[in-house]
Amino acid sequence: MSDAIKHECGIAMVRLLKPLQYYKDKYGTAFYGLNKMYLLMEKQHNRGQDGAGLASIKFNVNPGTRYISRVRSNADQPIQDVFAQINSRLNTLNEQFPEKINDVDWQVNNAPYIGNLFLGHVRYGTFGQNSIESVHPFLRQSNWMHKSLIVAGNFNMTNSKRLFSDLVEIGQHPKEMTDTVTVMEKIGHFIDDEVAKLYQKLKKEGVNKKEASPLIEKRINVKKILKRSAKNWDGGYAMAGLLGHGDSFVLRDPAGIRPAFYYKDDEVIVVASERPVIQTVFNVDINDVKELDPGHALIIKRSGKTTIDEIRKPLPKKSCSFERIYFSRGSDADIYTERKSLGKLVFPKILEKINNDLKNTVFSYIPNTAETSFYGMREAAEEFLNQQKTAAILNGQRNLSAEKVTEILSESPRIEKLAIKDAKLRTFIADDNSRDDLVAHVYDVTYGIVKPNDNLVIIDDSIVRGTTLKKSIIKILDRLKPKKIIIVSSAPQIRYPDCYGIDMAKMGDFIAFRAALELLKETNQYHIVDEVYATCKQQQHLEDSQIKNSVKDIYTPFSDEQISNKIAQMLKTEEINAEVEIIYQSVDNLHKACPNHLGDWYFTGDYPTPGGNRVVNDSFINFYEGSDKRAY
């Protein structure tokens, strides 16, 4: 993606189902779970590079022994830093007690991070903050094991203010108004409530406090706690939690917006945000890795009993399509196929722009995540060319010479790697003119391939702001002196903010929105902007369920093609000699390519939860009033 956007986050959980001695005997180390956690987190580093954290819980340790360990980092390479800290602690113990290296019982009681239950997290700081306090997992600690809670997740709530108010109404004093804190405290409140009720019941049965603790741990109803906690949540979430005594859960939002996958055998239960990560780390078949159903929780009791329980009634499934287009690694079998399909499906539009002239067209892509859709575009070009070859040979009948047939068969699409990003180049001067000149050199190009009469087709995952295209890519591609530069987005036009975990919150950032405003001005319809503002303001006092997305009216007067053409005009600066055109994927083709992942609110404005409509209206109000704050 030429305009980088950030996504939060990735989760990994491992629950070992055998005694630690089992893993020592079979795999040669009692640190089997910890090693797997490192791999699960490292193979999800694409999901977050601003922070990382890991927590572990030990079973069957005596009072006075630390049973929860947690380490977090916001260093430049946070995953490596987390495990460097862990290794330093463990290596120090090995040096001090070399005779205990093979003593699992001693390690359990003396070494940190050797446990039965692990939770890891990788994070992007979408709010521009990257303090260590913002890094997951979060910990709510208590002297009662069953009241201690560790939470980490890939989520964003649209109604954090309401959730905060709910906590205040029940007498709490949350330390901050973030969705992570409010969610954890809400769960914690109902854990406390459940424990209090269980204790009162046991007390009536004549059980004293010390005897009650292990009985509470067995009887505590995680499903009931989650149902009560999540009742008013509005957002996208894949959330994992550990209770201090050993129960654990992973909960997914009712619309399935954020992803969660799990695998279980007789040795381990593992959860991750991406399916191929589990396949690779545990060397299991794709069919053995299951997707957690929307609105459901995977609940693992301390005993190892595992259930899948409905916590919220599922909504129509609207899994985030950006996961398929860009965020998730393309090593997933389905995602790879879907990305290729995106490239194929947009090809007919490309043919129109180049007048079917493949001979004078060079195809390339903007590295690196657009490469798979580029393969799909290439296959479509080859199929079209093969049809032309077949027609030429059949039309020639017996009049074609062997040389002519060879010439026809040798034709192929002109596929080249032209744009190469210089990952080490950084801007370091604050002056705008100096910075712009440096940004223009972030990409290098391959010279000597493009001819003066050539069309140059470059495919990208998506075009969000258009900044990098305007200031860097198009300028550099124009140096190759093509007749026409065609930028292709394998995703549709991004028109609306996301509020479920992607760093796209401000209306004014989107080039499609700015293009629509320009068209409104040119067609003397800018009064629509004032009307939309008025309707957005009128709805602010309504309940989320009553609010409609009024911002759609900004785009209604224009076709997709008109907006794309205006974007092309906006991206072409005076010094660009080549003609510039922009092609976007259609929403219909997106759904054809990704039929099981229909979350498209950033393209269509059709939000899967009521809170989304409030966010888009508030985002427009902020734009209209000149406020730079976020809408959630």
Image: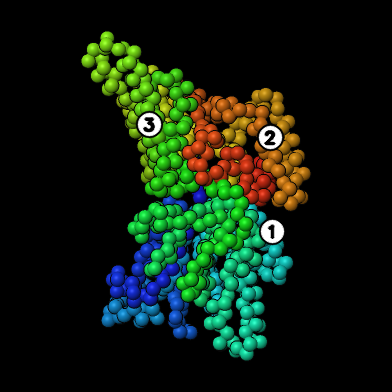
- Tag 2, which secondary structure? helix
Q: Which residue is mark 1?
A: 162
Secondary structure of the residue carrying numbered label 1 = helix
- For marks 3 and 1 on the same chain, the one whose residue lies earlier in the sequence: 1
Give me the residue at 55% from left, 71% from top: 149
- Report the disc number at residue 367: none
* Image coordinates for residue 109, horizontal then vertical, percent: 40, 81
Q: At 56% from the left edge and 63% from the top edge, which residue is drawn?
A: 309
Depth check, front residue: 184 or 178:
184
Mark 2 packing: few (<14 Cα in 10 Å), some, or many (20+)? Answer: few
Contact between marks 2 and 1 (CB within 8 A): the answer is no
Check disc 2 and report the residue beneath it: 553
Q: Which residue is mark 3?
A: 378
> Relative to 154, is 341 on the left or the right?
left
Q: Position of residue 575 (x, y in %)?
A: 47, 24
Marks 1 and 3: in contact by CB < 8 Å?
no
Residues tagged 2 and 3 counted as in contact (Cβ below 8 A): no
Q: Which is nearer the N-term, disc 2 or disc 1?
A: 1
Q: Give the answer, above or below, for where 336 lies relative to 54.
A: above
- Nearer mark to the viewer, of 2 and 3: 3
- In the rendered structure, which amino acid carries the disc numbered 3? Arg
The local secondary structure at tag 3 comes to helix
> Label 2 amino acid?
Asp
In the displayed structure, does residue 232 sit left or right of residue 445? right
Q: Kindly indicate the quadrant of the structure image that contains residue 417.
A: top left
Q: CA distance from mark 2 to mark 1?
A: 28 Å
- Look at the image and tell me whether residue 119 can be seen: yes
Q: Nearer the viewer, residue 239 or 438?
A: 239
Tell me the amino acid under the disc marked 1. Answer: Arg
- In the figure, 44 relative to 25: above or below? above
Q: Residues within 10 Å of mark 1 (few under 14, many from 20)?
A: some
- The structure's colour scheme is rainbow
